[in-house]
Amino acid sequence: MNQITSKDNKGVKEYGKLAKSRSFREETGWFVLETVKLVQEALDSGVEILRLYATPVLAQAHPELVEKARAAGAECSLISPELEGKMTQTGNSRGCFAVCKRLDKLHHIDKIGKKGRFLFLNGLQDNGNVGTILRTAEALGADGVILSRDCCDLFALKTLRAAMGSAFRVSVYRSENPKEDLLALSRDFITCAAVVDQDACPVTQMKFGDSAVLVIGNEGNGLPEDIAGCCRVRVTIPMAGKAESLNAAMAAGILTWEMLRPPFLQP
């Protein structure tokens, strides 16, 4: 394997830029990963690994990962422990880094049929929340996740770390105009605006059926009124105590569980 020790190496500098810049990721069509688990998840999901960087300790501990990446066409290089410290964006890389080709994941919203249960994330800015919601969507069996144009980047490292591989497997759609798209979806789906409003329908009483879209708003501001107004129903999580709201990912988990609750658990 090729050995790299300089932080001025072209590939190393490119890795850092990809990790930090959404525009550079979009320009190149590449993204980056850290940790053995995420790289393994990517390989298992058919993601094309362009370059793999590993410390000698990592390469010795996981020769099968290096060989699998090499067999799939990746350029594999050894890096020094000192360089690992400069490359890591998380402080917990465990000596494994990869540059990957972006999957053609962001389908246009008109690719959605007329049936299924989806999450619509409007304006979420926290990568960890978006990644956690993707993971929840896969775990509970959602048919896909829709991201508004102003959501954070699906291919940001923090999003991918929080999703723990789910970002490679969940169907993801892009909404360029949330108001128009929600009005169009409302013709075939029960579109549900998640709000903090005691007059809204308690989610525990909501009958979602087989065609539903659950709309989750921004972490700080929730759903704008003009977006909520495009939905057919407003739903809320009944809460005791003095808490006014929940973290977006936590709220999405509760709401998604109610929407996708298995038939044998229905009240």
Image (tube, rainbow, N blue to C red):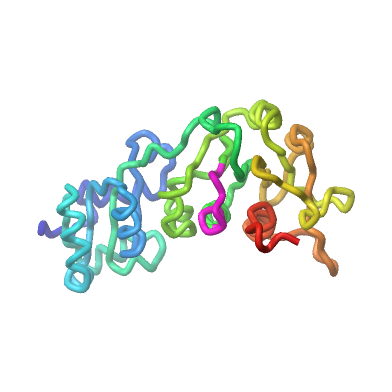
Q: Residue at x 56, y 40 (%)?
A: 147
- Residue reaching furthest left? 1
Q: Nearer the viewer, residue 10 or 52?
A: 52
Quadrant for the C terminus in the image: bottom right
Q: Residue at x 31, y 58 (%)?
A: 39
**Left or right position of 89 against 119:** left
Residue 137 drawn above or below residue 30: below
**Left or right position of 11 against 188:** left
- Span of residues in magenta: 136-145
Residue 12 drawn above or below residue 243: above
Image quarter of residue 245: bottom right
Q: Is residue 110 magenta?
A: no
Query: Is any atom of residue 227 visible in this view?
Result: yes
Q: Position of residue 48 (x, y in %)?
A: 27, 46
**Left or right position of 11 against 255:** left
Q: Residue at x 20, y 66 (%)?
A: 80
Q: Position of residue 41 (x, y in %)?
A: 35, 58
Residue 119 drawn above or below residue 225: below
Q: Position of residue 123 (x, y in %)?
A: 63, 42
- Residue reaching furthest front? 264
Q: Residue at x 79, y 41 (%)?
A: 233
